Amino acid sequence: MGFYDFPKPERDRLVAEINQEIEQDLSHTTDAHIVKYCSDEDTYIRKTAYLAIGKIFYAQPKLQPQIFTTLEKLLKSDNELIRQTVINAAGEIGKFHFDKVEHFMNKGLFDKHHRVRNAVIGSIKKMGEKNPVPVLAWAKPYLTHPDKEIRREICHGIELRGRTHPQDILPLLQALEFDETKRVSETLVHVLGQIAYKKGCLKTVVTHLNTWKNKPLVRKALDEIVDVHERYKKFAVLSQQDAIDYIDANYKH
């Protein structure tokens, strides 16, 4: 049975048990329970495990050295689920202590398995939302990395910060405006669409796009922005027509 196959009281009991057993492992410098939960096939069990590690990190500073020792060891595991969960646990710590987990992100970004690399993207999103300055400074050089997948993943990873503070990521995204890799440019257009429909964001995005030189890409981005206002009309601040009118009035062709 999967995590959500259980009734809520059973889920609550299971979460408490996972938290307790992970804390016991860390207190006794063992990792049997941690390995078990970090390698579980159920996504939500693994999520409970990495959230537990994050909670323990903040609640019990004396266990922090053992947490890092354990995460370092498990990052070398042959099991991609364990490595994925390690990166997600490091992401919880990096929300407020990015300097302590930067090297985990550097390693995870080049992992051979997409699950681990996707965990880096997810971690960048949650860390960048809470702790943007060091996270974006770390991300910036990777946007011009020779590996197209690295560029694409970092572009995707900084998206969430842009939904509330587009001005923080637009100068970084501009480094990709002439990227010749289709997957990268498609991700760039997607991200521009995603950061433009939140409150106050369309003005910031359009103003910045006026400074971009790649006009064909900008037109694709503007089309995506218009489409997003329809696809996410329940969440968008402006109607699609309002977005069209604003772009027509403010984008300098």
Image (cartoon, grey):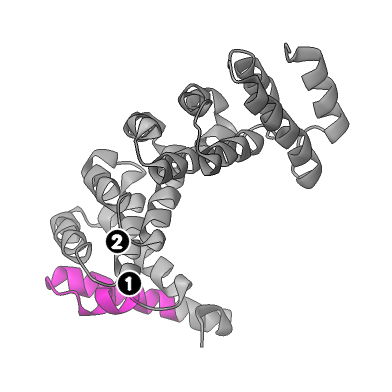
The reply to whether callout 2 and callout 1 are in contact (CB within 8 Å) is yes
Say which label, 2 or 1, has the lower sequence index. Answer: 1
Residue corresponding to mark 1: 38
The amino acid on which the numbered mark 1 sits, given as a three-letter code, is: Cys
* Picture quadrant of residue 95: top left
Magenta span covers which residues? Answer: 14-39
Kindly identify the residue that appears in the image at 50 percent across and 33 percent down.
Answer: 180
Kindly identify the residue that appears in the image at 23 percent across and 57 percent down.
Answer: 60
Which disc number belongs to residue 187? none
What SS does tag 2 mark?
helix
Let me know if residue 141 appears in the view: yes
Q: Quadrant of the C terminus?
A: top right
Kindly identify the residue that appears in the image at 29 percent across and 61 percent down.
Answer: 86
Q: Is residue 134 highlighted in magenta?
A: no
* Picture quadrant of residue 22: bottom left
The amino acid on which the numbered mark 2 sits, given as a three-letter code, is: Val
Kindly identify the residue that appears in the image at 49 percent across and 21 percent down.
Answer: 171
Which disc number belongs to residue 86? 2
Q: Is residue 211 left or right of residue 198?
A: left
Give me the C-alpha separation between circle 2 and circle 1.
Answer: 8 Å
